[in-house]
Image (cartoon, rainbow, N blue to C red):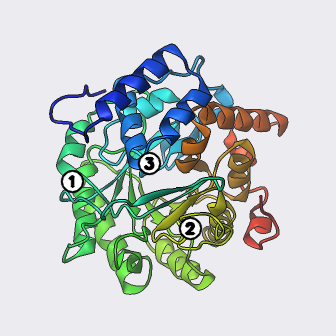
Amino acid sequence: MLPLTARHTFPRGFDVAFSELGRFFRLSGTRQFSHELLLSMPPEAAHAATIAALRMGAVPKPARPDPENLGLELAGLGLPNPLGMAAGFDKNAQVGHALCQLGFGFAEVGTVTPLPQAGNAKPRVFRLEGAGAIINRMGFNSAGHEPAMARLDRPRPGATIGVNIGANKNSDDFVADYVQGVRNFAPLADYIALNVSSPNTKGLRDLQSGEALKRLLGEVLAERARAPFRVPVFLKLAPDLDEAGLDEIAAEIGAVDLDGLIISNTTLSRTGVERFKRSAEAGGLSGAPLFNLATRRLAQMRLRVGEKFPIIGVGGIHDGPTALAKLAAGADAIQLYTGLVFGGFELITEIKTAISEAITNAGGTGPGVLVGTETKDWAAGKAEL
């Protein structure tokens, strides 16, 4: 883990937050206090302070190793458990190792853009208190490829780290930015995720359809073929696609050597959160209100790509039952981020325990016994939480 240095500067007052977080995590471990501390801070300040705490090693590690029945293989990657940290948390690849040490089976860093960019104007992150949701319009704020490449050292035993790549908002050619991402990170990443589904970069979601998608997949996978070894490539989709859009994507990926899908990104919908303060803010909605929509889209795509095509399910997971439902809908592995904001790091153990117990109760030896048991119901809209 990299130490804090003068090269890593943050806004005034963060040194106090870092000190308080470090003292708390070393001496207390009390969930309520951590929430009070972090939720009393502006969202981006709380996030930066948490990153700093992880970099300082101020977060307690699991008391025991994962149960053996949580292990799985995903797109050729051996994982100790199926729970990953979603992209968006560790945008600049600072704490991927720490997240895996914390108990995640894998961590996805990024979104990383080729050149540094500041993202959209602040404020750009809004908690919807009481809804377990966040609206963000970050806009791919990124330090660029070079710092992330410098931090992604190999080998890294015990840590599986994927890199989520995107395009600079002022780029003349979005596809070329993704190709560059594959070129730079294929030797360093355990897998690469193509983020073409963020709603906060104008025109980006156009890459999910038509000739744009065909060109993207063709050029990215051609670049992957030139890498020193084969790195799995995943495509991350939006939950706002209709079924015709899912049909088109399924046809395109069926014609190429893509390794998997990540479903889904944030949504532009505000269904179910209209009464909450800040719900009208522009940006993508994440958290509990996204769960049913994202899970239905996952199941609908599972029916289109078949049982064996790897899918990572993300969107709205916030406890054991939602994690299990995501698997039942057809996810081979799952990710969360917003759930941690409201549930704390204890949520990692809670979810893994629920999955392990469900595997045992089903008479299985791994997470696969739970996958796809309710796909048709979720796809048809007959299941929801």
Sort mark 1 into few (<14), some (14-19) or many (20+) by Cα contacts within 10 Å: many
When the figure is inspected, residue 31 is found, relative to residue 177, above or below; the finding is above
Identify the mark at residue 144; answer none if there is no mark: 1
Q: Splitting the image into 4 quarters, where does residue 155 fall?
A: top left
Whichever of labels 1 and 3 marks the residue nearer the N terminus, that label is 3
Q: Quadrant of the N terminus?
A: top left
Q: Amino acid type of disc 1?
A: Gly
When the figure is inspected, residue 80 is found, relative to residue 74, above or below; the finding is above
Horizontal arrangement in the rendering, residue 150 relative to residue 192 (left or right): left
Q: Which residue is mark 3?
A: 43
Q: How many marks?
A: 3
Describe the element under mark 1 as helix, strand or loop. loop
User: Would you say residue 100 is visible in this rendering?
Assistant: yes
Whichever of labels 2 and 1 marks the residue nearer the N terminus, that label is 1
Q: Nearer the viewer, mark 2 or mark 1?
A: 2
Q: Which residue is located at x 64 percent, y 34 percent?
A: 70
Q: Position of residue 59 (x, y in %)?
A: 46, 24
Marks 1/3: CA distance? 22 Å
Horizontal arrangement in the rendering, residue 354 relative to residue 124 (left or right): right
172 or 15: nearer the viewer: 15
Q: Amino acid type of disc 2?
A: Ser
Q: Amino acid type of disc 3?
A: Pro
Marks 3/2: CA distance? 15 Å
Marks 2/1: CA distance? 31 Å
Describe the element under mark 2 as helix, strand or loop. loop
Q: Which residue is located at x 33 percent, y 73 percent?
A: 216
Q: Can you name the residue that lies furthest to the top here?
A: 27
Q: Which residue is mark 2?
A: 279
Q: Position of residue 194 (x, y in %)?
A: 38, 62
Q: Which residue is located at x 41 percent, y 53 percent?
A: 232
Q: Position of residue 333 (x, y in %)?
A: 59, 48
Horizontal arrangement in the rendering, residue 172 relative to residue 100 (left or right): left
